[in-house]
Amino acid sequence: CALLTLCAGWCALARVGTHRPGRSSLIPWGLASAVMVGLYGAAAPATDVKGLTSQLFRPLVSTAKNLTTFAGIERETDVLLQVEDGAAFVTVEKSKLIDVLSLKVNGKVDASTGYDMATQRLVAHVPLLLHANPKDVLVIGLGSGVTVASALRHPVDHLDVAELSSGVVAASMLFIPWNERCLFDPRTRLTIDDGRNYVMRSGRSWDVIISEPSNPWMAGVADLFTREFFAAERSHLKPGGVLCQWVQTYEIDAATWRLILRTFRDVFPHTVAFMVNKSDLM
């Protein structure tokens, strides 16, 4: 891409000069660029997917004490799927040590068949049990699909899913033993769209909204933790509706965590907080 861009820049500069080269004079440059790109493609090493998704940007992983242990765990990990779309780089990895599938979005684990299962289930069961008669449900963030499957265990009529990344949808197919083929349920309607845009443009209302995006410190996610978005969600709840918002308690300072809770309560003054696994809050 860099070589092609250089060639295009040369062509543009040549055309704005006093000499306007004909098509024949551009052919050597195009051929040279094509040859160089081909040689680079043949000689370039394969992408180190494990290194790319190693999560070394996370304090939990990057501390000197954990690096040696982490390197050993990575060696015992198989990459089952890798998909890059316009929104994210998505992988599904399986640990040989603990027999757990993990779904990573841009290197960050956002779902798994291990430690995350309790949260993925309860974030659906709790709000649906608290509602008197939930019929229409919205889930923001598909992930592994376990939350959607948990919601479908209740007598709902319609369940909308807003997921930004088509790669996550592809990854969820590897979690079918846990998500019970939730996307094939006739009550489910999947939309590939940003959750914020989907809520604001849908013109629909729901009995229960379950918002389970990635961590607010991940790029592009913070918009789903703002007062404006909480207010938009409230305006799309039916009378007596319930919103369940997930937020982590790890890798976040106390001031930011309290800010998120204050912002939520500013829009939803009748709030109950549940702790799950000592690290997840809903």
Image (cartoon, rainbow, N blue to C red):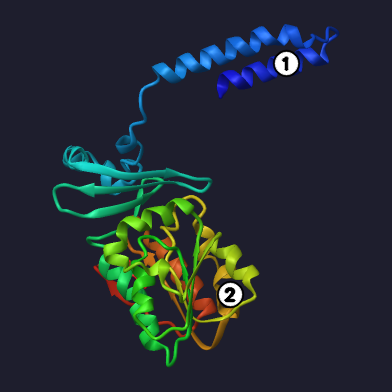
- Secondary structure found at label 2: helix
- In the image, residue 153 sits, relative to residue 169, either above or below, namely below
Query: How far is disc 2 from disc 1 in space, using C-alphas?
Result: 51 Å
Say whether marks 2 and 1 touch (CB < 8 Å): no
Left or right: 203 as drawn, with respect to 241:
right
Q: Residues within 10 Å of mark 1 (few under 14, many from 20)?
A: some
- Secondary structure found at label 1: helix
Residue depicted at 52% across the width and 53% down the height: 220
Which of the two marks, 2 or 1, is nearer to us in this view?
1
Residue depicted at 70% across the width and 14% down the height: 10
Say which amino acid is labelled 1.
Answer: Cys
Question: 162 and 152: which one is in front?
Answer: 152
Mark 2 lies on residue: 231
Say which amino acid is labelled 2.
Answer: Ala
Of labels 2 and 1, earlier in sequence is 1
How far across and how far down the image is residue 227, in percent?
Answer: 56, 69
Residue farthest along the bottom direction in this orientation:
132
Question: 96 and 219: which one is in front?
Answer: 96
How many numbered tags mark residues here? 2
How far across and how far down the image is residue 263, in percent?
Answer: 51, 71
How far across and how far down the image is residue 275, in percent?
Answer: 29, 73
Q: Quadrant of the C terminus?
A: bottom left
Q: Residues within 10 Å of mark 2 (few under 14, many from 20)?
A: some
Residue depicted at 33% across the width and 32% down the height: 48
How far across and how far down the image is residue 167, in percent?
Answer: 44, 50
- In the image, residue 114 sits, relative to residue 268, either above or below, namely above
Mark 1 lies on residue: 11
